[in-house]
Image (tube, coloured by chain):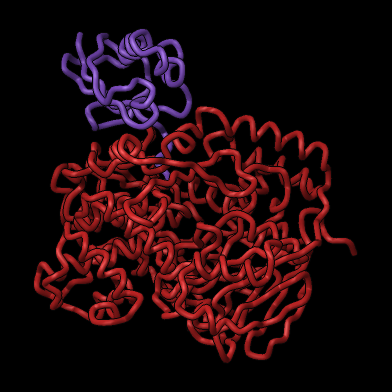
Amino acid sequence: MPATPGYHGRYLRIDLSTGLSTEIAIDAECLRDYLGGSGLGVALLLREGAAEFDPLSPQAVLAFVFSPLVGSPVTTSAKFAVVSKSPLTQRLNDSLASSGFALAGKKTGYDALVLVGRTSELSILVIDNDQVSLQSAADLQGLSNGDTQRLLQARLGNEFQTATIGPAGERLVRYATISHDGRHAGRGGSGAVLGSKNIKGLAVRGTRRVQWSQPQALTSLAKQLSERSFGPATAKYRELGTASNLLTFNRLNVLPTRNFQQGSFAQAAAISPEELNATRKRSRSSCVACTIGCEHLYSTKGAGGSVRLEYENLFALGPLCGIGDSDVILEASRRCDELGLDTISAGGTIGFAMECAERGLIDAPWLRFGDGPALLRALDLIVSGEGLGELLALGSRGMALEIGQDSIHFAPQVKGLELPGYDPRGLQMMALGFAVSARGADHNRSGAYEVDFSESVDRRDVGPESAYLAVETEDKAAIMDSLILCKFLRGIFADIFVESAEILRLVTGWDVTAKELRATAQRIVTAKKRFNVLAGWTPAEDTLPQRMLRVAIPEDARSQLSTERLAALIKAYNLARGWGEEGWPPDTKPHFL
Amino acid sequence: MQVTVELFGIPRARAGVSQTVAHGSTLGDVLLDLARRFPALGETCIQDRSLKPGYTANLRGEKFVTDPTLRLREGDAILLLSVDAGG
């Protein structure tokens, strides 16, 4: 039977212990139910029984998942998802990245590449259409992402696209990334999972294209979307980049500063993109098949070249650690990219350690808020594993559990994942999103901050009657992350479900509707929750750090949450999801299990 | 009536200033005044007396507002910014 247009209808399962690879069919019903990307990833992980395995054990499952839109003319669709159990959270982790790896990966002829097992030596996994081989990576050991990718392309040729880990992934740092061409599957430690399998990187090449159900109409619609992507809804990303959030958040006192001890940073203006634009060379870049071009790179001192700056690495390696020197922030960002560290978790963990040092809970008098060289030294220690590095490599929750003395109360994490740059006390819809998200404190799987930045709620006094809005933003994200489309497009859609259904109809030929996609989103979010239940989730972990529930943001007494109010929000969210008050999903298995 | 307007992101880039004073008794009046004095800001962010899609306003750092008939008080602070906060 021919595959559904947009899909190959199969995934490649590679057992790295034996070197054997197996093609496994994915039926059309499963594809329609879970689409691709994050959705299909969690479905495959459930099929593989991945929830029960230690994420750093040979049995652990790591899936690179493509989507029906990859290779199509739809803007921003060259994306892939990396899905596994997280070594940082011990819960589901799905992180997305972009560009040529997605295109080449899908052209190998598979909708997903699923890795299990462990090689006996550090290796490169080469997938050339259906030819799978392992090559020694002994000469690449300890190399940065950039150097590894350059050497691999020189060795294999430019037709191969590579996804690699840096030294952080090799050393199993719990928040190590997987990188491709300057983009990162960043959150949750998928780089450590790949490192635990002794795989330094994947190199993929292929010639197998999928068909589109209505190619002419798809091209016409894609052209319209591209034109709309040049409009005002994306101007912020094109012209300034996400870093322009910094001064807005600072003004609203929701810019996490010095490990969430403050909501504003006195040196914010000095490190803002507005200041950097005035004082440094800036260039722009974009992913393959993207018409937005959101990446803004700033020149650095010395031989460092230029560094991509986003709001999240700016906040995490800047105000969160009390750093007001843009040279330090850019250098720290460069090191994270090259070493293969998630900038949010790295900054969050170091900021937490700075407060621990300040309180005398750890013996690291050199590690002080605002000390740039100390920040850079800490990043190097994380990867070398020397001194404090061994603790830092565990993430803030792991550190707190080792340190004790109630330090967990101010460890900036939910389910072990460090909070991004939104203080939940002043953005309380986002607080709910952080608490309930399957992968922990996260702004990409729950876009609830959009509601906080609207007239729909009082962001500092959100009540349970508004919890359904968090469900809606999470559902939108589930669809975008499964199709996969860039979140920066969301502003151009009047109704993401209606327009996504139209795109999917043209790609696949399915008679899919907006109503069906809403049900699909709920199914995907529930599947993620089900994975977490199988991995040991309990209602107690849907919460925020005690600091967020006991202390108001110092600059704004109205920015205060309480345990009781958060519990009421979570209960309302769970009921809106149909999961019962405590959040247990109905005990039904997906049809393919 | 005089109010302070603080500009962030694209509105700041278009106006070329981070802060200004504007006149009007309603949000719509203030937006009209800004569009007249800063044509590039008006062209990108303001349509008649309202904000274009993709932009929003915040009153005194307290609450987000877009209704052009919203009554203002002498000395109020209005923040103009992009809607999307993500990144």
Q: Residue at x 29, y 57 (%)?
A: A317
- Chain appearing in red on the rendered image: A
| Drawn side of residue A380 relative to residue A170, left or right | left
Q: Residue at x 45, y 78 (%)?
A: A142
Q: Residue at x 77, y 76 (%)?
A: A131
| Drawn side of residue A424 relative to residue A502, left or right | left
Q: What quarter of the picture does the N terminus of chain A occupy?
A: bottom right
Q: Residue at x 61, y 46 (%)?
A: A76
| Drawn side of residue A543 relative to residue A224, left or right | left
Q: Is residue A37 above or below residue A503?
A: below
Single out the residue that lies furthest toward the front.
A302
Residue A532 appears in view: no
Please state the horizontal and vertical placement of residue B64, each as a whole percent of the image: 32, 30
Instruction: Tell me the colour chain B is drawn in.
Output: purple
Along the line of sight, which residue is nearer the eye, A219 or A201?
A201
Q: What quarter of the picture does the C terminus of chain A occupy?
A: bottom right
Please state the horizontal and vertical placement of residue A189, each as a whole percent of the image: 45, 70
Q: Quadrant of residue A159?
A: bottom right
Please state the horizontal and vertical placement of residue A226, each as a whole percent of the image: 64, 35
Q: Is residue A305 above or below residue A128?
A: above
Q: Quadrant of residue A117?
A: bottom right
Along the line of sight, which residue is nearer the eye, A406 or A281?
A281
| Drawn side of residue A96 relative to residue B61, left or right | right
Please state the horizontal and vertical placement of residue A173, each as a whole percent of the image: 39, 76
Residue A322 appears in view: yes
